[in-house]
Amino acid sequence: MSIFRKSVNAVLIGIGILYMVMEQTVPSGREYQEWLISEQRINCDARDCIHSTLDPMGSSTRTLPFLMIAKTEIYDDTDNSIKVLGVFKTFIILKNQLKRDHHFKKHKVYEESA
């Protein structure tokens, strides 16, 4: 067997192993929602949430065998969204247009009482 043939076989085996690892580590929709709550402070009930469960929002996810693309939009405001790539149980932010002060201005419930 020639060196070229061995190299091609090694590359194909490496790609196959990488594909299998990626397939086993694609984040789920549930993990995406948990990440939104813990890292982006979206869609939660705590006082320090940026957008609570009261805000009209929608999420869409597209899952392939080796990666996930997810987007969440806050409907009552223009350009208030986040889009991420999920791979290896990690989320990489592709586009973040979340307005951080939106919720605090809109809902006076979150103001500290004197």
Image: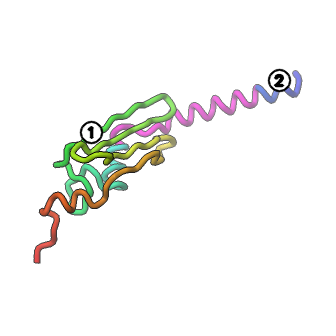
Q: Is residue 95 left or right of residue 12?
A: left
Please name the residue that numbered disc 2 is placed on.
Answer: 5
Sequence-wise, the earlier of marks 2 and 1 is: 2
User: What span is in magenta?
Assistant: 9-31
Residue 39 placed where, x, y %? 37, 55
Q: Would you say residue 91 is visible in this rendering?
A: no
Q: What is the image's colouring?
A: rainbow
Q: Residue 51 at what x, y percent from top left?
A: 24, 53
Residue occupying the point 46% across, 41% down: 86
Q: Can you say whether 14 is above or below 47 in the image?
A: above
Q: Where in the figure is residue 28, as x and y percent of width and height?
A: 39, 37
Q: Residue at x 34, y 46 (%)?
A: 81
Would you say residue 30 sits in the magenta stretch?
A: yes
Residue sitting at the far bottom: 114
Q: Is residue 9 left or right of residue 53?
A: right
Give the class, few, some or many, for how many residues have Cα within 10 Å of label 1's Cα (few <14, many ≥20). Answer: few
**Residue under pointer 1:** 58
Q: Quadrant of the N terminus?
A: top right
Please name the amino acid that badge 2 sits on.
Arg
Residue at 17% x, 58% y is: 106
